Image (tube, coloured by chain):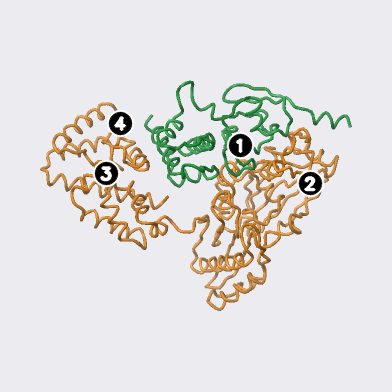
Chain colours: A green, B orange
Amino acid sequence: MNDSRQSRAKAQISFTVNGEAKQVRVYPMERLLDVLRLELELTGAKEGCGEGECGSCSVLMDGALVNSCLVPALQAAGSSIITIEGMAKGDRLHVLQLAFLECGGAQCGICTPGMILAACHLLNRKPHPTIGDVREGLSGNLCRCTGYSQIVDAVLEAARRRLTA
Amino acid sequence: MRSNPSDYEMTAPGSLRATLSLLASEPGAWLPIAGGTDVMVQYAAGKLAARKLVSIWNLPELRQIEVLAHEIRIGAGCTYTDLRRHEVVGREFPLLAAAARWTGGIANQNRGTIGGNIVNASPAADSLPALLAYGAELILVSVRGERHLPYISFHTGYKKTLLAQDELIQAVSLARQFSEYVSYARKAGARNAQAISKVCIAALGRTKNGIVDDVRIALGSVAPVPLRLHETEQAILGKRIDSPTLDRVREAVTAEIRPIDDIRSTARYRSAVAGNLVIEFLNRLSSQHSEVGRAKAPDVLSRWNFLPTDDAVNAILPCCGSKAWARGVAARRPFVNEEALLAASNEVWQGVPPSAWMEAFASHPRIGETGTIPSTPAQSRLWSTQEQQPVADADAAVRAALADANREYEQRFNRIFIVCASGRSPVEILGILKRRLKNDGDTELGEAAEQQRQITEIRLRKWLQQ
C-alpha cells in the first residue's frame, strides 16, 4: 500500500544537541546512537554491547541518563541531548573531565564518555554523594581497564571541587 | 544479525486515544514501544518480529501516579525512576521501590516502565513479585472501554498474557493497606545492578499475638511465570513461627516452585535459595523487622570484618589518616556492631605514638582551606570540604583572621591546627584557635588528639552508613 510505503520513509526529526538546534532526515527506528555518530559526526558516545548493558553509549536526554543504543530516533524528536562533546566549554574542560584526568579515571577511553555523563547525572541530583551513591550511579557503566576505584575517586574529587568552586 | 531500520515503520500518535484507535484499526499489527529497554534489545539482535511500532513513550495519560484515598494508581508508562522518587510508593510500597532500585542501572531505570515490565512477562523480572504480593489490579484499556483484572491472573504461561491485541495496560492499582505489614525483599543475583536475578522474593506478613494472620509470598525466576506461593502461605497462616512450621514451610516451597537449569543458575540452587529466602522472611516476621532493599546482604561492617587486612586498612584510612591507627583497628576485627568498633578505635588512638597522631593531623587541609597532601584519600578530602562548609561560606574578615591565626599556630607548634569543625560556627572555631594558641606544648598535643578522635568518630559513623 502506498500509505505503508510512505510511513517507512525517512522522517524529519528536530532536536537540540549540546545546545544547538539540529534537523536530521532518518528512519524513525534508527538508533539515537547511530544518528549522533553517523549523521552528526559526534563520535564521543561509543557502542559497546548495543543492548543497554554496558553504558558506553550513555547520553543525557532532557537531563535523564539514557543508553542511546536503546532510543529510537523518533523518540528523541523535540528533546534536548547532551553528549560528551557538550561537556567542555571551548578549551575549558568540565570539572568531571579534569578530575578523571587527574585521578587516572580514564585508560582506554571507551567507557569514559558514558562514565562522565553518568557521573554528571548523579552530581546534578546529589551534589554530596557518598561512595555508595557513586557506585550506584555508575552501576550501569562497565569499565574493563581501571578496576573502578580511580573512577569513583574522580567523581568524589569532582564533587568536592564543585562545592568549593 | 543487526536489523535494518528501513525495514521498520514507526509512529508516535502523541495521545492515548489516537494510539488505541491505531491498535484497533489493525489488530496485532502494531507493537507498542515505551522506553525500549526490551524491544530495542530484540531489534538490535535482529529478533524483532513486529515491523510496525507505535511509540507510547511519555504519553501523559500513562505517566502519572494518582494517590487516592484507598488505592494508588501507577500509570503503566511510569519509569522505575518515577517509582523510586515517589514518596507514597517509597513509604507504603517498599517492595516495589526496592525492585525499582535494583532493576538494570540508572539509564535503564530512566527508560524502563512498569507497564513494559508486565507485558514483557519475564519470569525473572524484579518488580513483578512485588505486584503479586501487593495483590495488584491491572486496568486495561482499548477503544472498547476499560476492564479491571487481578494481576495474578494476567500471566497464563511463559511469556503469555491476557492482553488483547487492541489493548494497552493503562495503570496498576495497589490497595493502600499494607503499611503495617512486615516487608521483605531480596534479590539473589551475580550483582545488584544489571544482572538478572537467579531468584528474587517479595513478601509481606502480619502477626497477632504471635500467630500469623496474613501472609503473601511471591518469587521470581522459579517458574514460567512470576509465582505467588499460595500453598506455602497456607502452611504458615494461623500458625506460630516455630521450628516445626519452618520445616513444613521449606517442604512446601520446594513442592510449589518449578525452577529450571539455565544460563544463570541451576534448578537445585534455585530451590535451595528459594527455601532459604522464605525462611529468612519468616524469621524477620517473627521479630517484626522489615528488611527491604538490602540486596547487598552484608552491611558495611560485616563486609569489612572479613576483608583482607590491606583492604580493611585502606577502607578506614579516610576516617583517620594514621596508618598505625588503621592497622591497629583492623587487627582487632571482627566487630559485632558500631559501638564495639568505636570503642576499639578510641583505645587504639590513645595507644599509638605521637608520630602516628602527626600523620593523621597532616592528612587534613588547613581549616578554611581545601589543599591536602597528595596521599589523602578522595573520600577524606570530600568529608573535609563538607565538614568545613560553614567556614568556606564565612565572611572575608573571619576567613582572613583564621588564616592569620593558622600561620601563627603553625609557627608555634610546627603542625596544622586540628579542630572538629562539624557543628561549630566559623567564629566559634576562631575563638578556639586563639585560646589554644596559649596552650603549652603537651596540653595542646592532647587537645589536638582529642579533636582528631572526635573527627574519627563522626567519620566512622558516616562510613558505616554508606
Residue found at x 36% / y 54%: B312
**Where B282 sits versus B379, above or below?**
below
For mark 2, does the 10 Å Cα neighbourhood hold few (<14), some (14 to 19), or many (20 or more) residues?
many
**Which of disc 2 and disc 3 is earlier in sequence?**
2
Question: Which amino acid is tagged 2?
Answer: Glu
**Residue under circle 1?**
A47
Instruction: Look at discs 2 and 4 and give the one toward the viewer.
Output: 2
Q: Secondary structure at mark 1?
A: loop
Residue found at x 25% / y 52%: B324
Chain letter for the residue marked with disc 3 in the picture: B
**Which of disc 3 and disc 4 is earlier in sequence?**
4
Answer with left or right where residue B429 lies relative to residue A79: left
Q: Residue furthest right?
A: A1
Residue B23 appears at what percent x and percent y?
81, 41
Answer with left or right where residue B362 lies relative to residue B58: left
Q: Secondary structure at mark 4?
A: loop
Q: Secondary structure at mark 3?
A: loop
Q: Nearest the camera: B342 or B93?
A: B342
Are the residues at dot 2 and dot 4 in contact (C-beta closer than 8 Å)? no
**Residue under circle 2?**
B167
**Where B323 sits versus A27, above or below?**
below
Chain letter for the residue marked with disc 2 in the picture: B
Residue B420 is marked as 3
